[in-house]
Amino acid sequence: EQQRVAGAKERMEKLEEEMTGMRTRERDLTKQIKREEQQFQTENAELSKRARQAEEEQKIEQKSAQLKVQELEEEMQALRYRESQLVKRAQQKGNEEAELEKQMKEQQERARDEVERTRQVYEQERAKVRQLEEDARMLQ
């Protein structure tokens, strides 16, 4: 009977030691989980902050590009008007001296060149706007 009691006591002590080890392991794991959760929250907050900043920068770039395109469109319209005025003037003065006619043609050519250069810049800016709009859609 005493041996049975002693064996039971020994098993109880071993079980208590195991329980103490399990409690220690549980406490350590709980601390580790809390640290990892805190690290995750910190990293998540940083990523969210960066995403918001990138989105704001994207909006600013897009607005800037849109304003540039609008400015170029207005400039193109003014140049087209100027070109049409030059054409009208050339038609009205069709009977003047050849030198005047030559000068008008040179002005028209310069205006066309300027329109073409502006159109090319406009197309480039328009392409940037399209790319920024696509990037903005991808961020959302």
Image (cartoon, rainbow, N blue to C red):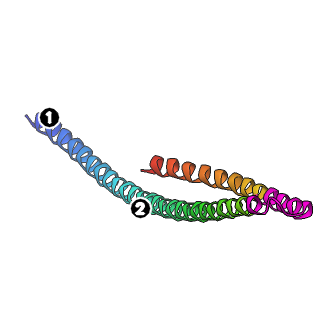
Q: Please, what secondary structure does the residue beneath circle 2 have?
A: helix
Please state the horizontal and vertical placement of residue 48, each as a whole percent of the image. 43, 59
Please state the horizontal and vertical placement of residue 33, each as a whole percent of the image. 34, 53
Extreme residue in the left direction: 1
Q: Residue at x 83, y 57 (%)?
A: 105
Please state the horizontal and vertical placement of residue 52, each as a whole percent of the image. 45, 62
Q: Residues within 10 Å of mark 1 (few under 14, many from 20)?
A: few
Against 21, residue 11 (above or below) is above
| Front of the two marks 2 and 1 | 2
Instruction: Answer left or right for 55 relative to 4.
Output: right
Quadrant occupied by the N terminus: top left
Give the labeled residue for mark 2.
Answer: 45
Does 103 lie within the magenta span?
A: yes
Q: Residue at x 68, y 59 (%)?
A: 84
Q: Earlier in the sequence, mark 2 or mark 1?
A: 1
| Residue in front for this viewpoint, 43 or 33 | 43
Q: Amino acid at mark 1?
A: Gln
Please state the horizontal and vertical placement of residue 134, each as a whole percent of the image. 51, 47
Give the labeled residue for mark 1.
Answer: 3
Q: In which quadrant of the rendered view does residue 108 lie?
A: bottom right
The chief SS type of the magenta part is helix
| Residue in front for this viewpoint, 91 or 32 | 91
Q: CA distance from mark 2 to mark 1?
A: 62 Å
Write down the region rendered in magenta.
90-111
Does 101 lie within the magenta span?
A: yes
Q: Please, what secondary structure does the residue beneath circle 1 have?
A: helix
